[in-house]
Amino acid sequence: MPPRHSACFISRLAAIAALGLLLPPSLIARNPAAPTVFNVRNLGAKANGRTNDSSIIKSIVKTAKEGGVVYFPPGEYACQGIVIENAKGLVIRGDGAASTLRPLSSTKATPILLFKNCQDVVVRDLTFDMGNQPIRGIGVTGCKNVRVIGNHFTQPLGAAGQQPSVAYFVDTEDLWFTDNLVQDLFVQHNNVRRGHFTGNTITGGKFGIATIVAAGQYADGINIADNVFQGVTGPVIVFAAAPGGSARVSNVSIHDNRISRSSPGTSITVGTDPTKSDTAAGEWSGIVIGSNTIQYRGDSATGAAISIGGAGTVYTDIVARDNIISGTGAESTGILLRQVRNATVTGNSITGLATGIALTAESRQCLVVDNRVTDCATVGYQLTASGGNNVMTGNYCFGTCARPTKFSGKRPTDRVERTELIRLR
């Protein structure tokens, strides 16, 4: 470089350096250091499926809990009771199916991983093989911004220990449970705000995704969407009120899920058990159930495919729209609303069930319009024990149906329209 240019270059560097000294630190670009990766096998875990790796993993997690990455390379890790408290920015990850965590025994009630009062934590790409043990894979309590992504939770086929939820979230805000595979197990949440359960595949198990809210508990801002459920034996998506509880459920969206089952029972339930009475005064509002596909295989449909409401609690601002429900069964209903206020039921298609849509138990100020019911053995649209000011008009009934409409116990303020049967050739 010629001397003149060299001197010019040096003076420019000096000017830039001086500017940097004058600027406040918040305006100076920084390159944060990459997080430290802690390879558990390199640090002493045996990963042979027999040796208890719990102690070494606990020690590693304690060291890494402020922004570190705990990496489980391929192997089988026998561990349990890994309690992680007050971590921030911690990532726990593996290599998918090759990185397997297994519990030691059913005598310890703690999950494999238990997070307490943590923030900004991620668990991803691990396999939790519960090995016929009635314990949980992941527990989360009192945490903020938790992401559980791309994991595989499995239980041996027909295992007796499949009753507990494999993942349990309580008192947690900003939760993402996404793109996980859950086999013969289920997911449970209580007292969660802004919880997102999306893109998961759940097969078998007693439930799919469930919450039972008791006195003083809540569920707010819950999004359950784009999941696939196959072969679940009980209710698939559950928001249930415990007897005697004054719970609050609000801003819930259940949409674009695909449910396929060959066992009887309700697929989506929001409210109390229809067979039980409850005098507690809870408040549930702002619930949307939309664009779900529910298919009952064989002659398995019983109860209601979608059940909303129940005794004791106030249910308002409910929407059930654009759902597709099909199946056969002598004691089945497509959509059942009980003791609901200000609900909208529209654009739904129900085929083959005994009853299409039923509005009952003092429901009032509800709009049922522009729905399609096909081949119902008993009745297409039913209004009984009305609470008044309901509208049931502009609906369609196709194929074979013993009775397109049944209006018993309606009130003068109800506006109903008898639906003519349109026979399909």
Image (cartoon, helix red, strand yellow):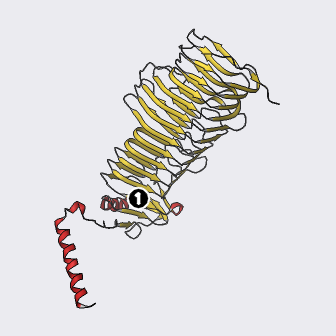
Q: Residue furthest top?
A: 412
Q: Is residue 217 left or right of residue 131?
A: left
Identify which residue is drawn at 50% across, 26% down: 272
Q: Nearer the viewer, residue 215 or 286?
A: 286
Q: How many marks?
A: 1
Three-letter residue code for mark 1: Ile
Q: Is residue 138 visible?
A: yes
Q: Position of residue 8 (x, y in %)?
A: 22, 82
Q: Kindly identify the residue that appears in the image at 38 percent across and 32 percent down.
A: 217
- Is the residue 20 above or below the residue 88 in the image? below
Residue 108 visible in the shown view = no
List the single residue furthest toward the right: 425
Q: Quadrant of the C terminus?
A: top right
Q: Residue at x 47, y 24 (%)?
A: 315
Q: Residue furthest front?
A: 4
Q: Quadrant of residue 172?
A: top left
Dot 1 lies on which element? strand
Q: Of 86 and 20, which appears nearest the observer?
A: 20
Where does the image place residue 299, in percent across and percent down from the top left? 72, 33
Q: The N terminus lies in which quarter of the figure? A: bottom left
Is 227 placed left or right of 168 in the picture?
A: right
How crowded is the residue under tag 1: few (<14 C-alpha within 10 Å), some, or many (20+)?
many
Percent x, y of residue 187: 49, 43
- Residue tagged 1: 92
Where is residue 40, by image quadrant? bottom left
